[in-house]
Image: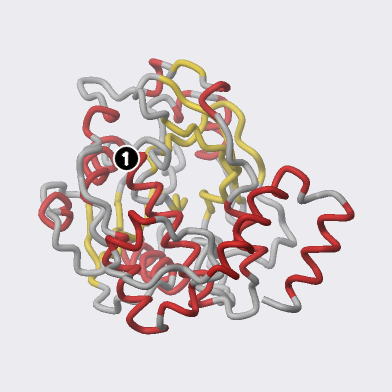
Amino acid sequence: MKQERPLLIVTSCTRNYGWVTRAFLEGNTRWADYIVIVDQMSTDGTREMCAEYKNVVLVDDPDMTYKENTRAKMGFMKGRELAAGRDAIYFALDIDEVMPANWMQTEDGKKILASKPGDMYQIEWANIMPDGKTYVRSGWQYKIFHDNGMDWQEVNGEMHTPLLPYTTWETIPEEIHDFPLIHFGEYHQQWIHYKLLYYQMLDVHQRRSKSAISIYRTYHEHKGDIATHAMPIDNVWQYPGVDIVKLVDVTSEPIFIDYMRELVKEDGIKRFWPLDIWDADLQDKLSVHEKCPLIWRMFHHYLRVTQPYCQKTWCRAIDKILRGIV
């Protein structure tokens, strides 16, 4: 008797990401048995789009705070409820990620489908470039878990946390090489610009032990002309009858301005002056009328000038001294 294949369940979280939701749904609904989307009460048409697909289940999350691990747990547990005890493989995809159309036909895809409970996999991003025709590979992401019934592992931190159960990385997820994960994080340039600014403010707001120096070094580590490494998008990644890239709306206004206003209102502007984000455009959008103090502008100049040398011993020594001051 032929063994029944595991259910394929996608989990995702969102809040007003309607600009890319259609691409996510048109691609991933074609192979997933269920897609569970935890939504923070979106008002941009996201919820209406989700209602158009029979295999999409919307979970309401009225809590507006940014807690990735909490939202991910909500989606995963709803997935287990839908599976009702059946064997299942979970794909924790961000709302701006789409599995390529050919993934099941590859050797690695077949390996995932034939995996055993407890198996974990990580995939490399194919970042779609703003031209919509090329991509750049970067960043391995833990995205796939064959459920073995383990309890959800709570973690500290509210951003950049695992979106699936894990065992404190005692087991390193196996790498997938036959296909990448299509990622639209670089495609909408204005969106990613303000998203990264927001993330830096969120780091200050939530991670009280992380210095402005560490934040700057992290967010500028790979800054450069990544487009020079771009390759043409592989046609086998496209789904029949639909061009998912063209479904992405790059004219939408980034939502992160409102989020940043909330943080400034809650914490006060002085808390965020150490971040090198304060150009006239951002100050205008956030209605910040006072000028960034000279001492912080000098600090920002130091960070920019020394970024190419940040791994040098002398630079790391100066950074260490400055961390004790700022």
Horizontal and vertical percent position of residue 64 = 30, 76
Tell me if 289 is positioned left or right of 117 in this view: left
Quarter of the figure that contains the C terminus: bottom right
Task: Tell me the SS state at disc 1.
Answer: helix
| Front-most of residues 22 and 296 | 296
Horizontally, residue 187 falls left or right of residue 161, namely left
Q: Which residue in the rendered view is the most extreme toward the front?
A: 294
Residue at label 1?
28
Residue under the point 21% across and 41% down = 22
Q: Nearer the viewer, residue 169 or 244?
A: 244
In the picture, which quadrant includes the N terminus?
Answer: top left
Q: Position of residue 150 (x, y in %)?
A: 57, 69
Q: Is residue 88 visible?
A: no
* Residue sitting at x 34%, y 24%: 132
Quarter residue 300 falls in? bottom right
User: Taking 63 as reference, is 302 above or below it?
Assistant: above
Residue type (three-letter) at the residue carrying disc 1 = Asn
- Check disc 1: other Cα within 10 Å, few if <14, some if 14-19, many if 20+: many
The image position of residue 57, as x and y in percent, is 23, 59
| In-image side of 293 versus 140 (left or right) | left
Whether residue 231 is situated above or below residue 201 in the rendered picture = above
Q: Is residue 318 above or below residue 125?
A: below
Task: Give me the residue at 27% from left, 61% from top.
Answer: 285
Residue 32, horizontal then vertical, whole percent: 33, 43
The count of marks equals 1
- Can I make out residue 206 in this image? yes
Placement of 24 over or under 36, stated as above or below: above
